[in-house]
Image (cartoon, rainbow, N blue to C red):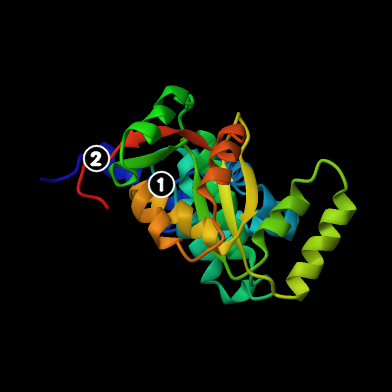
Amino acid sequence: MSLSKETLAQSALISAIYDREDASAFNAQGLAVYQQSLLANAKHALEISFPSVCQLVGDEFFSQLSHKFLHAHPLIAGDWGEWGCKLPSWIASRTDLAEYPYLGDCAQLDWQCHQSERASNCTAELDSLQLLAEHDAYQLKIKLCSGVSIFPSMYPVVDIWNAHHAVDNEAEQFSIAAQSITEKKPQSALIWRPEWKAKVKEITATEYLFLQHTLAGKSIGYTLDALANTDFSFESWLPQALQNGLLCGIEPLTNNTL
């Protein structure tokens, strides 16, 4: 089926805006307005989704980064809020950003925070905790609140994130981050949204394993068996998770997941 003239013209305009085709058929001044508006929208969207990255590289460099990313991954249709999903891997693949080897992981942490803040609200189902006393642990699973995720990194992404989101003791937080970068300290992050703003916390290897199994829908019994030879305490974790707005409730296992 052939495309209509209107569709072809629209496609040509989009290609011209993104500097992908000869723009001589269009008014140069009008095209420049489109391009400037597009770039401004792209930069603004990425500033919202990746605040740590923006602060790390500075406004001028971030503008250049936004322009290059927009050219590589144009938004033809859809939501600006979802458009930046490929930025972390795009940053990691660029040799001209080798000066910031941790930048791709910082972008990934920013993105998971952004997704957490866009997740639906969750109300703790406290009555469901009674299931722990009534059913076998292999028949139950933990329901975490919407927007909970984890991220393992070879770099001190939590310390870097804390430094760029510090409300108090900003100088101290930057000092900690700088020391962690020098020491090449790996960190695993927990991301969740107890209220309207995402939070980030460093977690241990055992906490990471516990949450990894939990997010995969594994039973409580299976998960605790996997941590049998560690210092992880489910009895200590449970009330803390409730207090911190991490836990939504307990659910029966309704499939064949262990």
Is residue 26 something that shows in the picture? yes
Say whether disc 1 or disc 2 marks the residue closer to the N-terminus. 2
In the image, what residue occupies the spot 86% across and 42% down? Answer: 168
Name the kind of residue labelled 1 in the image.
Ile
x and y percent of residue 186 in the render?
A: 63, 69
Q: Count neighbours of disc 1 (C-alpha within 10 A) and say few if under 14, some if 14 to 19, many if 20 or more.
A: some
Tags 1 and 2 in contact by the CB under 8 Å rule? no
Q: Secondary structure at mark 1?
A: helix
Q: Is residue 215 above or below residue 103?
A: above
Q: What residue is shown at x 33% (from left), y 32% (from top)?
A: 134
Check the image and name the residue furthest to the front.
133
Percent of width and height locating residue 22? 42, 58
- With 11 as the anchor, is 19 left or right in this view? right
The extreme left residue here reads: 1
Give the side of residue 229 with respect to residue 136, left or right: right
The disc placed on residue 251 is none
Task: Using residue 258 as the reference point, say whether residue 78 is left or right of it.
Answer: right
Q: Which residue is mark 1?
A: 14
Q: Where is residue 163? Give x, y as percent.
A: 77, 53
- Where is residue 202 drawn, in percent x and y? 64, 55
Residue 3, by quadrant, is: top left
Rounded to the nearest angstrom, the CA distance separating label 1 from label 2 is 14 Å
How busy is the neighbourhood of tag 2: few (under 14 within 10 Å), some, or many (20 plus)?
few
Q: Is residue 138 left or right of residue 117?
A: left
- Say which amino acid is labelled 2: Lys
Residue found at x 59% / y 55%:
189
Q: Quadrant of the N terminus?
A: top left
**On the image, numbered disc 2 is attached to which residue?**
5
Q: Nearer the viewer, residue 63 or 168?
A: 168
- 1 vs 2, front mark: 1
Secondary structure at badge 2 equals: helix
